[in-house]
Image (cartoon, helix red, strand yellow):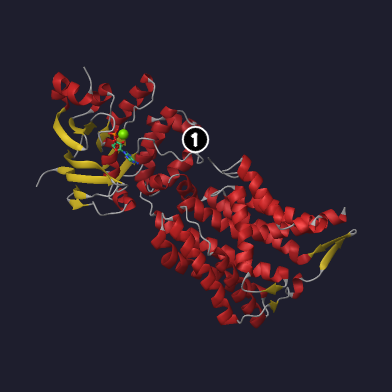
Amino acid sequence: MSSSLLKLDQVEAYIQKFHILQGVSFEVEKGGVTVLLGRNGAGKTTTLRTIMGLNQVGKGTITFNGENIGDLQTHQIANKGIGYVPEDQGVFGDLTVGENMRVAMKKEDEETTRRMEWVLELFPDLKKFWKKPGGALSGGQKQMLAIARAYVNENELLLIDEPSKGLAPIIVDKVTESIEQMKENTTILLVEQNFMMASKIGNQFFIIDDGKTVHKGQMEELKQDKVLMKKYLGIA
Amino acid sequence: MDLIISLTVNGLATGMLIFLLAAGLTLIFGLMSVLNFAHGGLFIWGAYTGVWSFQMTGSFIVGIIVAIITGLLLGLVTERLIIRPVYGNHIQQILITLGFMLVLQEFIKVVFGPDQKAVFPPEILQGSFLVGDIVLIKYRLFIIAVGLLIFIVSSFILKRTRVGLIVRAGVMNKEMVQSLGINIKLVFMLVFMVGAGLAALSGIMHAVYSGVIYAEMGLEFSILAFIVVVIGGMGSFSGSLFAAILVGLAQAFMAYYVPALSLAVNMLLMTVVLIFRPQGLFGKE
Ligand SMILES: Nc1ncnc2c1ncn2[C@@H]1O[C@H](COP(=O)(O)OP(=O)(O)O)[C@@H](O)[C@H]1O
Ligand SMILES: [Mg+2]
């Protein structure tokens, strides 16, 4: 038995008739941050969506805590303890910040309240704009709301898709810092193109290219490996 | 002046009845993009079962309750058997719900007979109030009051309760709602049932309003509801109230001043809205 929390084994997925994922395999161990890297269009978002059951698994298996979740429906997968922050954040624009949180909160027990307080301390803007519609928030605030919404329930794993996308550097720092704090007690699978951010908080990495996992290792090693970075990430 | 007030009351009453029918339609569409042409069938079943039990018991309240329960149950069955297999396929939805509409309509004739039936309001709602020179027909005021009450209660639920927030969130982003661990199919079933209940309520109230029921009135009246959903913006609850009142008033005034145009006016309204605001008055692009 391995200690992996999430395991994808030769996962394939189609979007309409396009064969998008053609063999994605990786394991996320309990604790820490696993980073999925790869160029635009490599299949990172599709991989997260497939884990969430938003795309069907064509072939292969996805196991979470030793249980096959590949055939479950999205809400069932979420209720196993996986929180999802999609690439477009998925903030409900007509609902206020507070209402967005309320939709997300599965329980109203002590633990949830405690997590809510913690996350509001982390993102004071959310508290400040509690009654503002989600659609009226800045990009950075939307990102914070999306992360807070995924964190507020007692999830074991958070899937976060390119949280730095389109944000000003100073906001990226803020988001980076918040993920660093969350990784203390939650396992995180992070898709990130911003190498600075990825290398700062990532422990292990996997590279996806053309819908297949092609490389894996420790983040520390990748920083040294200029050839690999250039080949798959286009970073010189 | 009294003519204008009286026409306005007529228009508001008709508008409220259309609203009750359109409210469910618009949420059903907004939440699951389901086009439900069987909605008028739920309306006539509400009308017939409601009127039947009203006439059997002599109690209008019992009639209303029976109509609503019929709507809820029929809504449950319709969602399970007719709608669920055709999620995501508009062509199939149109065909199967139109077909089911006709089945519901013909089945009315089997159960209750093919002839028109006369219906009278309960005694307490017969007659009118006289305010100055203005005659206010009691039953019309009753319809307006019920419509407003339903609007206020539903708005409260949609704005203040978690279930309501989930419904609105689902209209905006279904995938995200599911990703937060919510079974959207269950939410949809609930919305569908409530929508059907409101359609059935509209049916019994309309039956008493028009004084007559016949099987085809569901299809006729639901066309108005579809127009209202398009004008108000698919998925917009407030939009459906606004548009229903607009259509009700347009119809009432046209019927008096330019009777020849009274049917065309709603189509005309819809066309104008579609040209200038294709997403409807309250709809999001
Ligand atoms: N709805 C879709 N229809 C067709 N192709 C799609 C769709 N969504 C994504 N793709 C394709 O799938 C591939 C992987 O996309 P994605 O997972 O979003 O990549 P990444 O997140 O790594 O940038 C891309 O080539 C993209 O063009
Ligand atoms: Mg992506």
Q: Is residue A166 left or right of residue A132?
A: left
- Answer with the quadrant where ligand 1 appears in the image: top left
Depth check: B236 or A210 in front?
A210
* Residue under the point 60% across and 81% down: B112
Q: Is residue B224 left or right of residue A200?
A: right
Q: Position of residue A14 (x, y in %)?
A: 27, 46
Q: Is mark 1 within 8 Å of ligand 2?
A: no
Q: In what element is the residue under mark 1?
A: helix
Q: Is residue A187 above or below residue A124?
A: below
Depth check: B46 or B213 in front?
B213
Quadrant of the rendered image containing residue A189: top left
Residue lying furthest left = A1
Quadrant of the rendered image containing residue B107: bottom right
Q: Is residue A202 left or right of residue A149?
A: left
Q: Is residue A59 left or right of residue B228?
A: left
Q: Badge 1: few (under 14), some or many (20 or more) residues near its Cα, within 10 Å?
A: some
* Residue under the point 47% across and 63% down: B95
- The chain ID associated with circle 1 is A
Residue B245 visible to the viewer: no
| Quadrant containing the C terminus of chain A in the rendered view | top left
* Residue under the point 26% across and 21% down: A196
Amino acid under label 1? Answer: Gly
Q: Position of residue B190 (x, y in %)?
A: 47, 60
Residue marked by disc 1? A135
Q: Position of residue A107 (x, y in %)?
A: 38, 49
Q: Position of residue B53 (x, y in %)?
A: 62, 79
